[in-house]
Amino acid sequence: MALNLFSEIKIGQMRARNRLMMSPMSQNSASDDGNATNWHMVHYGSRAVGGCGIVLMEDTAISPAGRVSSRALCLYEEHHATSLQPVVSFCQENGAKVGIQLAHAGRKAWRDRRTADIGRVSTGTDAFAPDWGAPAALDDAGIGAIIQAFQHSAVLALRAGFDFIEIHAAHGYLLHQFLSPVSNNREDSYGVPAAGRRRLLLEVIAAVRAVWPPDKPLFCRLPAEDGHPDGLALDEVIEVAAVLGKLGVDMIDVAASNVSPECRIVTSGDMQRVSTLIRKKAGLATTTAGDPNQAQDLLDSGTLDLIAVGRPLLTNPYWLLAHADDEQRTRLWPRQYTLAMPKSA
């Protein structure tokens, strides 16, 4: 049977009802201590009610120094998992599979201007931009702590009931900072050449996969490219994706770069092109950003397996329901809505 947006998808042992995924988008609406709030329940719950097969929650800090803002969602203490669990349950009760994106901002972490720098870290001491504070260079002990923090957050994600997790290695965050030659000039085993630059990412994936159940999928977000003459080459991105697959990653989420202000903007067309090549050359399932109105063309062309939609779902969380036919409406529309709605509506 031909695939379409409403086709079920199996990722690892997880089955999602369709191929629409809500993209992770920072909400900056957590409590001061990083807990989920009523905003997250309504925001994510609406997209589950709206028919999304998969809801991927926003970049979530694995440590205090990894937060992208003072209101960033966090998952490094038990109370964080406890606050997330009702949101996860509600989305699942309304038919969606739910994931969380684990991240460390590295040198792009926020600065608490009321007190002092929270302790940015990176590959070295170069600031992201002139008006950003300089990070501290991670030593071996610090790198080990980062790996343990990702692993601990994965354990907490399991306790919160998530169906899958995504490791964020794009957008110029810490794992991308190590991966990219633009930001990694280290001369130790975590630096040049390419095998060193990717070492931290691979060790994080291995550590997470060791505690994340084999029947639950693991995603990894990679940059399509750096948009910089000295940045990641396309061949290296594909090679990294292939290695990640061997370590137990089930899907690659192709995203933007922004590892340096000097990088050009990576377009959705760039991401879709790289997504296609990873599917063909690395043999892995992929997702990337796309216009939901073009979903069928993207599926037909072999560009992706799962379409990630962000801003269009912000303006209309029920976009998918509005495009469902009668049979699909029976499966997707909430019972509470169908009772009050004519069949032909």
Image (cartoon, rainbow, N blue to C red):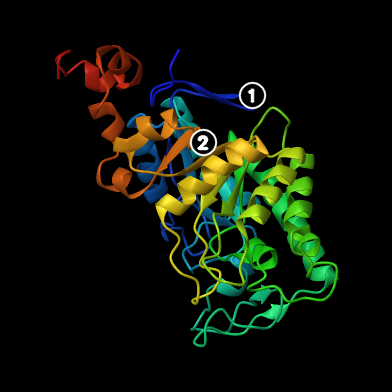
Residue shown at the point (48%, 34%) measured from the top left: 306
Residue kind at label 1, given as amino acid type? Gln
Q: In the image, residue 129 lies at what x, y percent?
A: 52, 82
* Disc with the residue nearer the chain's start (2 vs 1): 1
Q: Which mark is residue 49?
A: none
Q: Residue furthest bottom?
A: 130
Residue kind at label 2, given as amino acid type? Val
Residue shown at the point (14%, 15%) measured from the top left: 342
Tell me the residue that label 2 is attached to: 98
* Above or below, 140 relative to 255: below
Q: Secondary structure at mark 1?
A: loop
Q: In the image, residue 210 lies at what x, y percent?
A: 79, 41
Residue shown at the point (51%, 57%) measured from the top left: 73
Q: Secondary structure at mark 2?
A: strand
Mark 1: few/some/many CA within 10 Å (<14, 14-19, 20+): few
Residue 215 relative to residue 307: left or right:
right
Where is the C terminus found, in terms of image quarters?
top left
Tell me the residue that label 1 is attached to: 13
Q: In the image, residue 89 lies at what x, y percent?
A: 49, 32
* Above or below, 131 relative to 303: below
| Of 218 and 299, the residue lying toward us | 299
Residue shown at the point (50%, 32%) measured from the top left: 305
Where is the N terminus found, in terms of image quarters?
top left
Mark 2: few/some/many CA within 10 Å (<14, 14-19, 20+): many
* Above or below, 172 relative to 135: above
